[in-house]
Image: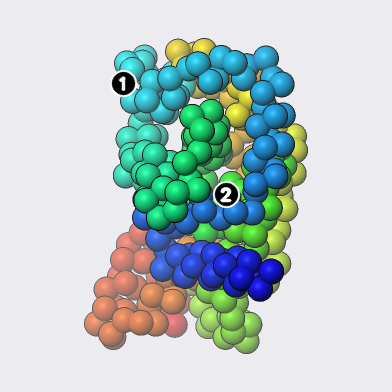
Amino acid sequence: MIERIKYESDLLKRWFAATEANTINNEGEIDLVLEIMYHFDSKSNKKLLKKFEKLDYAKTFFEQEPLRDVVLKGTFLRGTLGAALKDFWSQPNYSKDLVGDGLEAAKKRDEKYNVTEKEKKFWSGIFMEHDLIHFFFHLDTTTVGELSNLGFTCAKSYRKSFFLIMLVSAIHSFFRYIRDPIGLLILRWNVRKVHSIKFSILSIWKVMWKAYWVGKKRPWLLSIDWHSKLNKPLHLVEEELGIMSGADFSYYHKLEKEIAKINWWLEYGKRTPYQQQVLVHRLVRNNGIPFKILP
């Protein structure tokens, strides 16, 4: 029992460290995600797989070539779902097969990761779903973007691992942005003429909660035959599924801007006076802010 608690504590500490170092999207950390999922979701993995196997689409899914491979090898007309996904998966953050790399790394470390081909395919589907959520709702890969993604996912396929990852990441965000509430208030006051920062202790939790309720209203993305929709116009696919990328995650996109402001000032405080002047000139050039109101 004690060993189990130590092991679970170590897993979550490693995740906190990865979040702190901002390496959660590197292939070297994907095996950590898989390890957390494997350890905490042994029961829910089986339940979700059984739930998925009851769908009419399940048999087709296990026989199909992975969607990502089909998209990257295919040629699609401009404006179609396939063309948009190909552009998306060609970006640096999404260009590698992180699931395959992660499973290989995990197996080298522990033989228990010799999962069946069906389980491996299902896990790949879960990560494909994760990418599709980023794609359709324009979520970035920052901590807040990932928390929104997991909140949406938990609405249809709850996992203890996802809940714990969200909890640890939210705690990290607390320490990252709000560890000094008085300092944050002072920052907001000092820069009020340049940036009106609207960010509080509840912001991180609110963005996850809103994402969860968006997920409740939308279809389970893993249950959809995306292969059959690749040649359809993207806007028609979004209409068919009731996806409104801007409206669905409007709070996330607002919060994203507020965090960008905070990060700007945190970076500003680390620079030399000359570097600060360069940053201010760049801010003025990009946002059209008069010099006279700068602090």
Residue 28 position (above or below residue 241): below
Q: Is residue 275 left or right of 161 when viewed as pictured?
A: left
Number of residue marks: 2
Question: Which residue lies under the disc numbered 2?
Answer: 38
Which corner quadrant holds the C terminus? bottom left
- Residue situated furthest left in the rendering: 274
Q: Position of residue 32 (x, y in %)?
A: 47, 56
- Residue drawn at (61%, 30%), measured in percent from left and top? 221
Q: Camera-side residue: 206 or 295? A: 206
Give whichever of discs 2 and 1 has the lower sequence position: 2
Q: In what element is the residue under mark 1?
A: helix
Q: Camera-side residue: 252 or 68? A: 68
Colour logic: rainbow
The crowd level at tag 2 (other Cα within 10 Å; few <14, some 14-19, many 20+) is: some
Q: Is residue 69 left or right of 33 when viewed as pictured?
A: left
Question: Which residue lies under the disc numbered 1?
Answer: 73
